[in-house]
Amino acid sequence: MSPFTLVALRLVFASFGFLLFYWIKKPHIPKHLFLSLFLGLGLLNVVIPFLLISWSEQHISSGLASILNSTQPLFTILLAPLFVSEERITLPRVLGLILGFSGVIVLMSNRSAGQESGQYLFANFTMLLAALSYAGGAIYAKRKSKGLSTDIQAIGQNLAATLVIIPAALIVESPIQIPTLPLSWIAVVWMGLFSSFVASLLYFSLINSVGPTRTVLVTYLVALVGVLLGIIFLNEQPGWHLYVGGGLVIGGIIIVNSRNKKEDPCLDLPCP
């Protein structure tokens, strides 16, 4: 599947999940639909990073893609203080982010063999752009979505992204090549229902409760989970990379989430 087709199909299945969710829960829709907010979220959190990652992974290894994608917290901690008053650059956050990123590199160091091609360097750059887009989306959501329920934010983001990507796919990749392998359809359905539908609901809940910097720390866990799944399903033998890298990742998350006694108790959290 080409990138536009992959993203379009993924969002279509995510939309099925959101339609069922809306039918069951019936969240309140405000009179003002925040169209500009949804369009911004749809572009920054979905359309741009999904397309960039889908294209990049045709030219670089999945291990390298994981490392580059895990730079989201680094972009966020640098940009968030410029736009969100509650976000501050503190020494524990910097140390924790560096520690966690070091853990990701250790985890993927034994599986990030490069796939040299004419597009190799450009694919590295586009992966970094995807991470930057995710960071911008987290900050944008925290700054602009106050007073809007997390359910509506997730639904609106997905709807806006779907309305953008479907006509874009029809224009850019016409005629669209529909996949024929059953495994391809299983992968697309999985990404749509779990990686987009369920993940979006959890994402906005975290954004509004703990802030963008702590929310994007989930990207550090991607490499750790990938290693664990390889052990469980692919019979890969755990080595020192798992123990050292996993310890660094978990330690980094603990440090960033720790609070100094002098720190504002309402930092990142909704306080009365």
Image: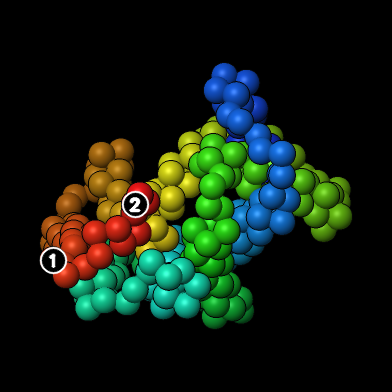
- Name the spot of residue 28 as percent of width and height, x first: 61, 31
Do tag 1 and tag 2 residues touch (Cβ < 8 Å)? Answer: no
Q: Residue at x 77, y 46 (%)?
A: 163
Q: Secondary structure at mark 1?
A: loop
| Front one among 181 and 32 | 32
Left or right relative to 264: residue 165: right
Numbered circle sitting on residue 271: 2
Dot 2 crowding, Cα within 10 Å, few <14, some 14–19, many 20+: few
Label whose residue precedes the other's in the sequence (1 or 2): 1
Which residue, as the protein is rendered here, is positioned at the far front? 272
Amino acid type, callout 1: Lys
Q: Is residue 37 above or below residue 23?
A: below
Q: Secondary structure at mark 2?
A: loop
| Front one among 162 and 4 | 162
- Name the spot of residue 118 as percent of width and height, x first: 61, 79
- Name the spot of residue 117 as percent of width and height, x first: 57, 75
| Front one among 205 and 178 | 205
